[in-house]
Image (cartoon, rainbow, N blue to C red):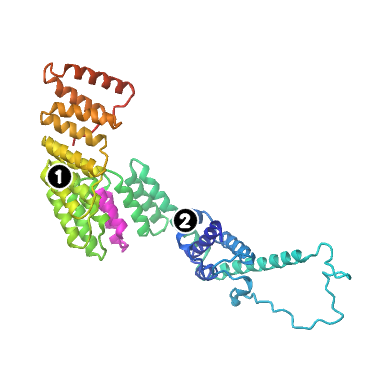
């Protein structure tokens, strides 16, 4: 069966189940029983939401029937589809006549000479038979839909509205006042008599997680879920922890993490990473390291993202000892740091002007096969300037350009400012740097590197 036909089969099954057509869905699964049908379900959600159950089921019947009668081996689909359908719907299998053919019986498809009559060859007969069976199958599908108990048009319309509001809530994430708009959509649902479920609340809290000031609304959503006896799942908690993290509310993030575990939900690596990121934003490097240890104590293996957040927390406080220790710990556990993790460690050393350690980490990442990016070089240059290593800083700038990485306006500004302090020692170099900076500005490239 081609992939397009598999998609149609899955669409029919999923839509029938979503709209309470339980018997239809069960029958379709028994009929199709395709090994890979589940892998298509996610990609079909949008298509299903725009179709009616009647239309999709009829299309399914047509497609499956076509392939069941074709000379193609389709796993789980019987050759004669209609005779295998449930008998309780009134479609009985036609048994071939047992009456012996008499001498006086005539086959209207055969002429006196034994040749097929004009316009009535074997293919025409097969087409007529297939059309008749397909019509019978359509009747069965329509009758199955009508016979389902508790599946009224109002209920189907309600299911479609619930799906529509999920999309409307998700769309709020691109709005500046996304959390407020998501809150408004939930209120609107309740006013219409629709009961928001965990998917709607998860989407709404996810909108809050994408907004710097959305954590309060996220917490309000969680409170409302508790009041309505809607149990938050991992998605809801992860989004709420992320929302608190974006606002630097690390204590709230930790409280939610432990509340999640208290409610019988297992916090995974993603959940812990969200909490670690909260500590990084709040410049709480020691608490971040404690939480990293907690991950291992509960049987979780921290990822490179986990370490990156903790090293970033160390960078914000200038704890270069902690940053380098974490890099060594990653090596012990066989975790290869990425460019972001190395960059954060370089930044931790640059905070205190430890240019030697900055350069060591820069060279270590190159030996590991990790190419430094613009931020890594700019931060190392800044570290050298703080350590009064102007020549090394100039060499790094040359190396940076040799790697086809463009220094930004801030890098030029800091380098020119520090070299000018050396009187006329770097006069010619300053002149060249000023020219390059001017050309950069003319190109409109004034992106800035943040020396955090």
User: Residue 364 has which mark?
Assistant: none
Question: Mark 1 vs mark 2: which is more N-terminal?
Answer: 2
- Confirm or deny contact between disc 1 and disc 2 (CB under 8 A): no
Q: Quadrant of the N terminus?
A: bottom right
Secondary structure of the residue carrying numbered label 1: helix
Residue 155 percent across, percent down from the top left: 48, 63
- Left or right of 21? Residue 327 is left
Q: Nearer the viewer, mark 1 or mark 2?
A: 1
* Residue 231 painted magenta: yes
Residue at 84%, 66% (x, y): give it: 117
Q: Can I make out residue 319 in this image? A: no
**Is residue 155 or residue 430 the one in the foreground?**
430
Where residue 385 sits, quadrant-wise, is top left
Where residue 415 sits, quadrant-wise, is top left
Q: Is residue 452 above or below residue 290?
A: above
Secondary structure of the residue carrying numbered label 2: helix
* Neighbour tally class for label 2: few under 14, some 14-19, many 20 plus, Cα within 10 Å: some
Residue at 14%, 52% (x, y): give it: 289
- The residue wearing badge 2 is 45
Considering the whole magenta stretch, tell me its main secondary structure. Answer: helix
Q: Is residue 342 above or below residue 274?
A: above
**Is residue 29 or residue 156 the one in the foreground?**
29
- Left or right of 373? Residue 195 is right
Q: Is residue 265 above or below residue 177?
A: below
Residue at 19%, 28% (x, y): give it: 395
- The residue wearing badge 1 is 314
Residue 304 percent across, percent down from the top left: 24, 50
Q: Range of the magenta residues?
A: 215-244
Q: Residue furthest right?
A: 112
* Residue 169 painted magenta: no
């Amino acid at each position: 069966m081609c992939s397009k036909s598999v998609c149609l089969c899955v669409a029919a099954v999923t839509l029938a189940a979503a709209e309470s057509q339980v018997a239809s869905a069960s029958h379709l699964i028994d009929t199709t029983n395709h090994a890979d049908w589940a892998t298509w379900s996610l990609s079909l959600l949008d298509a299903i939401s725009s179709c009616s159950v009647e239309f999709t089921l009829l299309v399914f019947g047509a497609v499956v029937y076509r392939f069941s009668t074709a000379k193609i081996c389709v796993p789980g689909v019987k050759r004669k589809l209609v005779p295998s359908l449930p008998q309780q719907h009134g479609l009985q299998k036609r048994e071939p006549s047992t009456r012996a053919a008499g001498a006086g019986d005539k086959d209207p498809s055969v002429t006196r000479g034994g040749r097929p009559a004009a316009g009535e060859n074997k293919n025409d007969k097969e087409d007529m038979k297939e059309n008749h069976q397909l019509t019978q199958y359509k009747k069965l599908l329509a009758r199955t839909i009508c016979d389902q108990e508790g599946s009224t048009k109002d209920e189907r319309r309600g299911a479609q509205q619930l799906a529509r509001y999920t999309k409307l809530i998700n769309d709020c994430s691109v709005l500046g006042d996304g959390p407020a708009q998501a809150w408004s959509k939930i209120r609107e649902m309740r006013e219409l008599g629709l009961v928001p479920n965990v998917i709607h609340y998860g989407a709404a809290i996810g909108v809050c997680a994408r907004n710097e000031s959305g954590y309060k609304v996220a917490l309000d959503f969680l409170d409302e879920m508790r009041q309505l006896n809607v149990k938050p799942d991992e998605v809801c908690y992860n989004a709420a922890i992320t929302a608190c993290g974006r606002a630097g509310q690390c204590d709230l993030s930790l409280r939610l993490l432990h509340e999640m575990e208290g409610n019988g939900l297992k916090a995974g690596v993603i959940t812990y990473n969200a909490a670690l990121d909260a500590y990084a934003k709040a410049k709480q490097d020691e608490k971040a390291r404690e939480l990293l240890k907690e991950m291992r104590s509960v049987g979780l293996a921290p990822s490179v993202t986990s370490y990156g957040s903790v090293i970033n927390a160390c960078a914000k406080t200038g704890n270069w000892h902690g940053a380098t220790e974490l890099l060594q710990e990653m090596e012990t556990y066989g975790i290869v740091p990425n460019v972001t993790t190395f960059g954060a460690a370089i930044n931790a050393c640059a905070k205190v002007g430890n240019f030697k350690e900055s350069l060591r980490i820069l060279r270590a990442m190159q030996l590991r096969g990790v190419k430094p990016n613009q931020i890594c070089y700019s931060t190392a240059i800044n570290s050298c300037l703080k350590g009064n290593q102007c020549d090394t800083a100039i060499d790094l700038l040359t190396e940076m350009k040799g790697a086809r990485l463009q220094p930004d306006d801030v890098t030029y500004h800091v380098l020119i400012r520090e070299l000018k302090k050396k009187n006329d020692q770097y006069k010619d170099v300053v002149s060249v740097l000023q020219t390059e900076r001017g050309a950069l500005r003319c190109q409109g490239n004034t992106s800035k590197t943040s020396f955090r």
